Amino acid sequence: MVDKVLTANRLGDGISVWLDASGKWVESLQDAFIARHAEAVAALETTGKRAFDANEVVDVNVVDVEEVDGVLRPLRMRERIRAEGPSIAYAPGYDGLAGPKNVAA
């Protein structure tokens, strides 16, 4: 089975969030709880439905991730963009999914 995490958008501001092991919504994919078996995925789905029903989050999804050298990475491009930012350089000092450029002063 592929590892999975629960993601959503916070209702108040639209920010992408992930569910952590304590049941809190966090802004970093790297802090997300990783479901590695069917029972854990079912628990994520139940928790996501409850949070949606309570108007905490919208667009709740269980998504596939891989862990490479201790770093989580979504398998789908849409989820990578939600986790890491735009895929193209769009502003000075930003290099798409590669992140901020290391610019010397």
Image: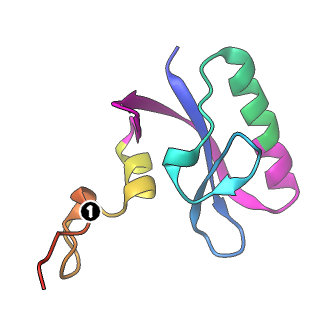
Mark 1: few/some/many CA within 10 Å (<14, 14-19, 20+): some
Q: Residue at x 86, y 46 (%)?
A: 50
Q: Residue at x 79, y 62 (%)?
A: 56
Magenta residue check for 13: no
Left or right side of 19 for 31? left
Q: Position of residue 48 (x, y in %)?
A: 76, 44
19 versus 40 height, above or below: below
Number of labelled discs?
A: 1
* Residue that label 1 marks: 99
Q: Indicate how the structure is coloured in the image.
A: rainbow
Magenta span:
48-76
Left or right side of 36 for 85? left
22 versus 54 height, above or below: above
Specify the farthest residue to the left: 104
Q: Residue at x 81, y 52 (%)?
A: 51
Q: Residue at x 62, y 26 (%)?
A: 35
Disc 1, SS: loop
Left or right side of 73 for 101? left
Specify the farthest residue to the front: 105
76 versus 27 height, above or below: above
Q: Position of residue 66 (x, y in %)?
A: 41, 29
Which quadrant holds residue 43?
A: top right
Which quarter of the rendered picture does the C terminus lie within? bottom left
Q: Position of residue 75 (x, y in %)?
A: 38, 35
Q: Position of residue 80 (x, y in %)?
A: 38, 48
Q: Looking at the picture, which amino acid does disc 1 mark? A: Gly
14 versus 87 height, above or below: below
In depth, the one of 53 and 18 nearer the eye is 18
